[in-house]
Amino acid sequence: MDRNYTVDGRNLIVELHGELDHHVAEEIREEIDAAINQNSIKNVIFNFKNINFMDSSGVGVVIGRYRIVSKLGGKVAITNLNPQVKRILDLSGMNKIIQIYDTCEEAISSL
């Protein structure tokens, strides 16, 4: 899985490509947590433009980062959802606690 992490102020933008599943979840989790700690991150924005599949491990990655940044007074946002991943978020109930935006720019300006 390709990924790119960008720090914009106190926001961490996580851009993932491919499948966010049990094969890569632990590694992604560790990388994001390290970036949060090293850069005094308050908010995490997941850009799912290039995610074509996500399983329960992927849901766990997002929820886990939500718990971490919530304790810091921050928020998690998700952008650029395709219909398949949106359905997973809807079924898991994540859409009730995590804001979903069309673009990263919208998420940054709202957070």
Image (tube, rainbow, N blue to C red):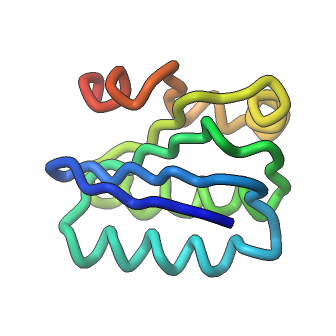
* Residue positioned 40% across, 60% down in the render: 5
Q: Quadrant of the C terminus?
A: top left
Left or right: 27, with 51 as reference point: left
Front residue of 95 and 48: 48
Question: Percent position (x, y) of residue 68?
Answer: 42, 64
**Relative depth, front residue between 104 and 26:** 104
**Quadrant holding the N terminus:** bottom right
Number of marks present in the image shown: 0
Give the residue displayed 38% in from the left and 49% down from the top: 13
Q: Quick check: 19 left or right of 65?
A: right
> In the orientation shown, which residue stands out farthest toward the left?
9
In front of the other: 64 or 55: 55
Task: Write down the quadrant of residue 84 in the picture.
Answer: top right
**Residue 108, image x and y in percent?**
29, 31
| Residue drawn 63% across the image and 62% down it | 61
**Residue found at the very far front of the displayed protein:** 2
Relative to 38, residue 59 above or below: above
**Residue 57: x %, y % from top left:** 77, 64
Residue at horizontal 46 percent and vertical 60 percent from the top: 4
Q: Position of residue 42 (x, y in %)?
A: 25, 54
**Residue 78 left/right relative to 17:** left
On the image, which quarter does residue 22 sit in? bottom right
